[in-house]
Amino acid sequence: MGWLQQDKGATVLIADDDESQLMLLEQTLLINQFAVIPVRNGLEAVEAFIKHRPDIVLLDVDMPQMDGFTACELMRSQFPELTVPIVMVTGMDDVESIEKAYAVGADDFIVKPISWPILGHRVFYYLKGSRALSEIKERNEREKTLFSAIPDIVIQFDETFCAKDIHTGRQQHLFSDNCVETGNLEGCALVLMVKALLKVQFGGQSGKQTDNFSRQQFEESLWLNGKLNHIEIRIAASQNNEVIVLLRDISDRKANEQRILNLVMYDQLTGLPNRRYLEDELERCLTASNPNGDKVALLFANIDRFSKIYESFGLKVGDQLTVKVGKRMKEGLRHIFQGEHGASPGHYRLSRFSENEFAIMLTHLSDSNEAFRIAQLMQDMVVDPFDIEHHEIYVSLSVGIAFFPDDSSNSVKLIEMAGQAANLAKQSGNHISCYSASFNEQAQRKLQIEKNLRKALDKNEFHLVFQPKLCVDEPSVLSAEVLLRWTNEDLGFVSPGEFIPIAEQDEVILDISRWIVQKACELNSRLYHEFGLDVTLAINLSPQQFSHQQNLVNFFVDKVSNVDLKPSNFELEITENVLIDDVDYTSKQLNQLRELGFSIAIDDFGTGYSSLSYLTRFNIDTLKIDQSFISTFDDPRNKKLIETLIVMGKKLNMKIVAEGVETTEQLAFLKQNHCDYVQGYIYARPLVFDDFVAFLQS
């Protein structure tokens, strides 16, 4: 990803008459370390384009004085030689608008609402494409100039192979003597060499026998002027039994081809990259910088009982099986990385490493479990039998996995480790084995968590704690967020960050969520009826409750009424992920809950698929700023972003809650910017029920 660093600091011209949109565009781009020139209409955009020559332009379509289409057309017409990317930002997604954008010279368009987290990456990719286009144009110009400056050598021979005329072109470096200038063509070293080659090509016959070898082409290496030169020679018969020979020095081209061949080598049987390709690619990948700390996984997949298949069906069937296994893997991996089977996006390289062994290099892995999942999917690819030569052949795969940098940062050792893991998988019968002991432990722990989660409710292993939420201006505890905790008899305390994602992958999260609501209602009832404390409790909702739980609204109404409380005693927290699935249904559910008196809050705002449309389309009461922004409070850009979120939320009549507040400096900053509520260790850690009651009463 070195190109990202290369484009940091690039100048972005943004034009939008909507002040809030312009401000968000500017802040987002500044966070990504761009220099930003903001303007408010098309006319100002054209003037700024002429004055500053930015690296990329983002134009809103609908603007006063001059719209984005006109501004784009003027920029292109006045500076046709520039390859500056121009991107239209529009709320219109009809074909006519899109075609008009391209017609006036736009490179692309972004449809509102903008996905802010990926905007910076899109700009980086536009800049990368622009740079690549400029480089291609420059290279084409250089090649054109080079071609015109260095034409072929043309030699005319008579029927007895005597040189009659010669055109040296611009390749004088192939001539060491002055025989051409003096007219002594037969004394020229290059001519003598070509003459000898012609006699060999024509089998010693004279030029009269040209009918059988006209338009022949071949290459030769000639030693000229103390240097070995690769020459492309083309022969054409002409009238009067003459032979025309064209010579081109292709030494540079051959050198480039050789370099390409060293990198691009494929297995002749399967058409897949071979072992050498994998070794080169792995070495390149491991030596490249990795600022994000992503992992690289090397998977070796062995075809089990391959020698038995050779013995039973022969070499031909064995080769066909190898080809078909490779084809299934290639197609299966392509589907996986196009988003099927729920696999995370990423990069992969498939190669045939040895006779019955395929290697898969996975890059940009944020989680080691992704490699384990890919290994399982690869095994699924070969479950169906292979029909070869009227034989139905069943195979299985043993997969070994090694990780960079966990296991080794050396490509040779990583290959050895993956091979050893594959052998271990084959010998142990587990079919998937990781060289990394730590990964094996993680995989085993995940399985243990999955197994114990299903029994945790029956064993009464869950309990709730309360994270107080206090008013910034007058610290008083009138609300809190209920948080789930789990202590298992075998695993001990298990962090929510560890077991909640696992529970979300299964419908067990629905049972857990229902238990949380039931328990929170019971405890809030005790606070009110036993202790006289009128407290609002915030409950986190799972996305699966909206997609899988029937009668969600009635469920909440029943639970609250059963404990003789009001909906206003509860706030329902959702994440942005809830909002992106089935928008109409989700909006209807939230509106019904809100009309009944429940408050609705967006939790962890800014960490998911943030979009302004969510804040305007859904009726939201509270906006919670994620603790990741508060924890990086010292970053001036994050301060600006926090200020922007607070102002934006206030203008939409939302209450603002800052999570993870730990220091007096953070609190003072939030108070200065009129944040409404805070929760965090600065006041209290999550408290069990009795401690929470005492905290309230104190």
Image (cartoon, helix red, strand yellow):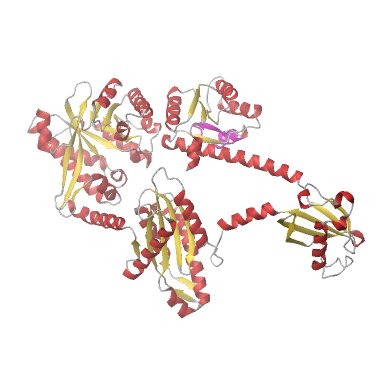
Residue 499 to residue 119: above or below: below
Residue 385 to residue 130: above or below: below
State the residue at coordinates (80%, 55%).
Answer: 246
- Give the number of marks: 0
Residue 579 to residue 210: above or below: above
**Relative to 62, 145 lies left or right:** right
Q: Nearer the viewer, residue 250 or 668?
A: 250
**Residue 676 appears at what percent x and percent y?**
26, 24
Location of the C terminus (image quadrant): top left
For the record, the magenta segment spans: 85-102
Q: Magenta segment: does it hold 370?
A: no
Q: Nearer the viewer, residue 445 or 413?
A: 413
**Residue 104 appears at what percent x and percent y?**
62, 31
Q: Residue furthest right?
A: 240
State the residue at coordinates (42%, 34%).
Answer: 116
State the residue at coordinates (25%, 33%).
Answer: 660
**Residue 304 appears at what percent x and percent y?**
40, 71
Q: Residue furthest left?
A: 530
Residue 672 to residue 355: above or below: above
What is the quadrant of residue 557 in the picture? Answer: top left
Q: Magenta segment: does it hold 97?
A: yes
Q: Nearer the viewer, residue 221 or 546?
A: 221
Q: Nearer the viewer, residue 410 or 474?
A: 410
**Residue 193 appears at what percent x and percent y?**
80, 61
